[in-house]
Amino acid sequence: MDPVLAIREYLDYVVARLITHPGACGISHEAKDGRHFFSICLHQDDAGRVIGRNGRTINAIRSLALASAEKHSLRVSVDLDDPLAEVRRGND
């Protein structure tokens, strides 16, 4: 299995089990300059569940993705899209 696909499936699996609005979840992937960027888009109610207390949950998710990437000599970045960004833009 392609390592990039395996990391994406891992992210899909873990995030889907943490959230309550799976229809509003999406994971995008972009490869640029030899680096793979994964972006997790969530419903605003689910962001706290994925971030966890003091960011522990998202940091654990990132650590496992990075460990898998290092095993295959890949460089990856896992980030959360800000679910409130559009709401904030509307208030400006």
Image (cartoon, rainbow, N blue to C red):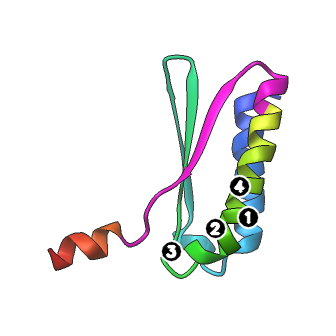
Q: Which mark is residue 43?
A: 3
Q: Quadrant of the C terminus?
A: bottom left
In the drawing, does residue 89 fall left or right of residue 10? left
**First-in-chain label (4 vs 2):** 2
Secondary structure beneath label 3:
loop
Q: Identity of the amino acid at label 4?
A: Asn
Cα separation, mark 3 vs mark 1, equals 17 Å
How many discs mark residues in the rendered view? 4
Residue occupying image coordinates x 60% and y 76%: 48
Task: Find disc 4 in the rendering and name its residue.
Answer: 59
Relative depth, front residue between 1 and 49: 49
Residue 56 in the image: above or below residue 76: below
Contact (Cβ within 8 Å) of mark 2 with mark 1: yes
Q: Nearer the viewer, residue 7 or 65?
A: 65
Gap between marks 2 and 3 measured at Cα: 13 Å
Would you say residue 55 sits in the magenta stretch? no
Q: Which residue is mark 1?
A: 57
